[in-house]
Amino acid sequence: MDWDDVDEEEMKKEEEEKRERLSWINIRSVRLEKARDNPNAKSYFARPPDELEGFDRMWVAAIDAPCLANLVGVFRNYGVQFADNFADWEDQSPEDAHWSIEDIASFKARQVYEATGLPCIASRTSFEIEPARKVEVSPNAPGRVPVANPRVQSGYKFNNIGDHVDYIVEALEPQTDPSRVTRFTSCLCYYDGEMEVLDYGYCDCDIYFSNSVRTFIPMAHAITEMCKTLQLTFGLEYQKWLKQKLQTAVGGRGGASIALRDRVLRDAKVLPNDIIDVSAFMDSNVDVDLMDDCAKELAERFTQMQVKPTKILTVATTGLVIAIPMAKYLQVPVVYARKERNVVMSSTYSAAFSSKTVGKNRELLVSTNHLNEEDHILIVDDFLSSGASQDALLRIVDDARATAVGVGVLLEKVYDSGRQSLSGYNVPVESLVRVQSVSEGVIRLLEEEGASSLFQKA
């Protein structure tokens, strides 16, 4: 026996029984009937969601009007726009007062879906008063005295909220125990033609504090639970529109660039000769998590190239903070140039450059055993200023007859001539953060293209 077939048959049987049961419900919405007869309704409900406002789904509601703002506010964070709300449902027969809130909510959701073609969230809230507890009280006791009136002692249940809730509470409250429990139960039903989901919210309240306004509490709970359920069901992403807008605003740059910008503005200092001191997080005190995130983002910019790098070439020791984690993501070895020859470097490629940081000419040395003509070299460093050190590395690559495929740095001083000085090598240059100026000891970063539109409508 195929249990899947048995389950499917059972589900079909349950669905048929439910349809038959719901066909006896007579409640109606005048607005929904007008929508059915309106020739323009089809195009109105078929309109696309407002993408400029961050919506990517269009649904419709059938809940109590005072609770609509809560529903709209919760689901807009997940890109759901509600085309309309049909809240004017009224009972048409005495039997309608005896249906379960599940059946009423399901009936409303299905009716609205059939009329609009949109997934619908419908609601129904019930109100209950527990039977009065029998209390033995001395005849001479002050205060309220229990009475034998069966209307006072009986329990009550209504499958809808309205003025009748306030009327009965006002009538019973003077004659009954003020702590007598009342319960509001809200049922939300989601229906899209294929799937039906029910979620609930509850509020227990002493009769002394009970009134129809308490309906907001179970409705809020039910809306939250329904949102959680549908988030898992459909993979709804919280504030997806804002993340996309942020991504567009920073010109395709990721969170690592933003985090690095924040650290530069907060912790970096300007030293004499306009030297930027980043020792608080990149040099003598390395934020390894930040460097790892930056390496991942910078590496991704070089993974789309036709020619993949086979090695990373950097300068010891400052360039290693970004070169080593980048090598992990690119799965290539790191070769670093020394500034002084050691005993194991018998044969080297060398290139001289002028260092602004130390204020004198330096020389970079790379062992000839580490580079060959088959290599595709990615130059990686912490700063791009005048471009002198990167130019020296590119000359070493040329001496080794290898091929340079790009230059990647964490920080670029755009007011300096580094990018222009490297333009003759015809290789892409990528930087995570661009420094516009350091005048008067203040670091100013270049506003990335699109950032100014972050909080503006497209």
Image (tube, rainbow, N blue to C red):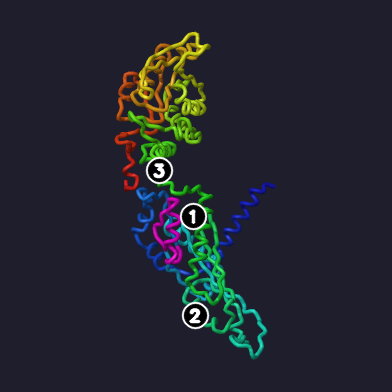
Q: Amino acid at mark 3?
A: Gln
> What residue is pinned by disc 2?
167
In the image, farthest residue toward the top: 346
> Mark 3 and 1 residues: CB-CB less than 8 Å, in contact?
no
Question: Which is more toward the observer, 109 or 201?
Answer: 201
- At label 1, the amino acid type is Asp
Say whether disc 1 or disc 2 marks the residue closer to the N-terminus. 2
Q: Is residue 168 above or below residue 377?
A: below
Dot 1 lies on which element? loop
Residue contact at pointers 1 and 2, CB within 8 angstroms: no
Give the crowd class for mark 2: few <14, some 14-19, many >=20 residues within 10 Å: few
Residue 41 placement (x, y as % from top left): 36, 58
Question: What's the amino acid at mark 2?
Answer: Tyr
Residue 384 x, y percent position in the rendering: 37, 26
Residue situated in front as seen by the camera: 284 or 308: 284
Stretch of the chain drawn in magenta: 62-85
**Residue 210 higher or lower than 434, as above or below:** below
Label of residue 192 in the image: 1
Tag 3: Cα neighbours inside 10 Å, few (<14), some, or many (≥20)?
Answer: few
Q: Residue at x 30, y 25 (%)?
A: 417
Disc 1/disc 2 C-alpha distance (Å): 37 Å
Q: Which residue is mark 3?
A: 244
Q: CA distance from mark 3 to mark 1?
A: 27 Å
